[in-house]
């Protein structure tokens, strides 16, 4: 069966449909922008909270433990202290010293002061040094300064991706060598983290993420996508792991939605 529709009406209907389509596309685009803005605000607030907790741990608990340590050391050095007591004081001093070191370490990993004070490149240099020492791998690093402001969310994102990838290398790979590259091109910032460890079955690893068992890889992917970027994981058993990230610079100051 055929319908006789005057061609003028059909053209008008098509125009109306096209206009409607454009309107829907625009509204989806705005919805996406609003969502990304909101999710990035949550990311920012989480980081602010980590910064506050890190300072409280360092300056509050850390300083109090520091003064306990000072008093114990004075006691240890006093002539009037009896030998059996001295041994107890020495054990306590060592316990407080270990505790203080752990608190400082947790505080730094929670939000390293160096990231806020000196920016991304010095913070990455510190992270690489610490991780190499802790896990016993050798790092070959090439860090180009992308020139981000110290409080730029993009810097925090890149730092967190590096931190999670290096943690994974330390925990799962048994790698002896790590290659780390930060590149700052005109339009995008790139990151490569590669290890020579045992690698893994990526499909299985990412499936763990969707079951909520392991969140590291999936959280990295979600955050990078939030910044309009792309993250690529490559690995095969006994072939190490590579993490490649590319984020457009324009995301550094994403305009708020109207
Ligand atoms: N560099 C790596 N070398 C070998 N296996 C890796 C590497 N990185 C990740 N994996 C594998 O991928 C899995 C998922 O990693 P993911 O970071 O998502 O979780 P996780 O490290 O186990 O836990 P968390 O949620 O604390 O990060 C790991 O359990 C590990 O098997
Ligand atoms: Mg992990």
Image (tube, grey):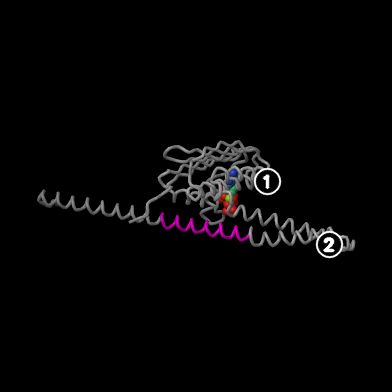
Taking the magenta stretch, the answer to whether it contains residue 47 is yes
Image spot of residue 194 (x, y percent) = 57, 39
Magenta residue span? 36-57
Say if the magenta span includes residue 48: yes
Q: Give the overall secondary structure of the magenta segment.
A: helix
Q: Nearer the viewer, residue 76 or 32?
A: 76
The residue sitting at 43% across, 43% down in the picture is 249
Give the position of the C terminus as an image quadrant.
bottom left
**Whole-Å distance between the Cαs marked 2 and 1?**
30 Å
Residue at x 64%, y 40% (from the top left corner): 175
Give SS at disc 2: helix
Front in this rendered view, residue 67 or 177: 67
Q: Which residue is mark 1?
A: 134
**Foreground disc of the pair 2, 1:** 2
Q: Which residue is mark 2?
A: 88
Q: Quadrant of residue 98?
A: bottom right
The furthest residue to the right = 83
Q: Residues within 10 Å of mark 1 (few under 14, many from 20)?
A: few
> Which element type, helix, strand or loop, lies under badge 1?
helix
**Does the CB distance between marks 2 and 1 fall below 8 Å?**
no
Q: Earlier in the sequence, mark 2 or mark 1?
A: 2
Image coords of residue 251 (percent x, y): 42, 47
Q: Is mark 1 within 8 Å of ligand 2?
A: no
Foreground pick, 95 / 26 = 95
Residue 61 horizontal side relative to residue 88, left or right: left
Q: Quadrant of residue 239?
A: top right
């Amino acid at each position: 069966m055929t319908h006789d529709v005057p061609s003028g009406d059909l053209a008008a209907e098509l125009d109306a449909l096209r206009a409607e389509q454009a309107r829907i596309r625009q509204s989806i685009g705005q919805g996406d922008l609003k969502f990304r803005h909101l999710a990035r605000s949550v990311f920012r607030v989480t980081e602010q909270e980590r910064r506050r907790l890190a300072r409280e741990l360092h300056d509050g608990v850390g300083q109090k433990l520091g003064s306990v340590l000072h008093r114990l050391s004075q006691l240890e050095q006093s002539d009037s202290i009896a030998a059996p007591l001295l041994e107890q004081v020495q054990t306590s001093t060592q316990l407080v010293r270990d505790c203080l070191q752990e608190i400082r370490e947790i505080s730094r990993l929670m939000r390293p002061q160096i990231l806020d004070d000196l920016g991304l490149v010095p913070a990455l240099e510190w992270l690489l040094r610490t991780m190499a020492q802790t896990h016993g791998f050798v790092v070959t690093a090439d860090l180009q300064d992308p020139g981000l402001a110290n409080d730029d969310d993009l810097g925090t994102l890149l730092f967190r991706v590096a931190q999670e990838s290096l943690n994974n290398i330390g925990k799962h790979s048994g790698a002896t060598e790590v290659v780390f590259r930060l590149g700052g091109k005109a339009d995008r910032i790139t990151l490569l983290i590669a290890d020579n460890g045992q690698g893994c079955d990526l499909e299985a690893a990412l499936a763990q993420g969707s079951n909520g068992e392991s969140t590291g890889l999936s959280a990295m992917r979600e955050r990078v996508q939030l910044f309009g970027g792309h993250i690529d994981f490559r690995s095969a058993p006994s072939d190490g792991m590579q993490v490649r990230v590319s984020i457009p610079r324009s995301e550094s100051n994403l305009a708020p939605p109207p």
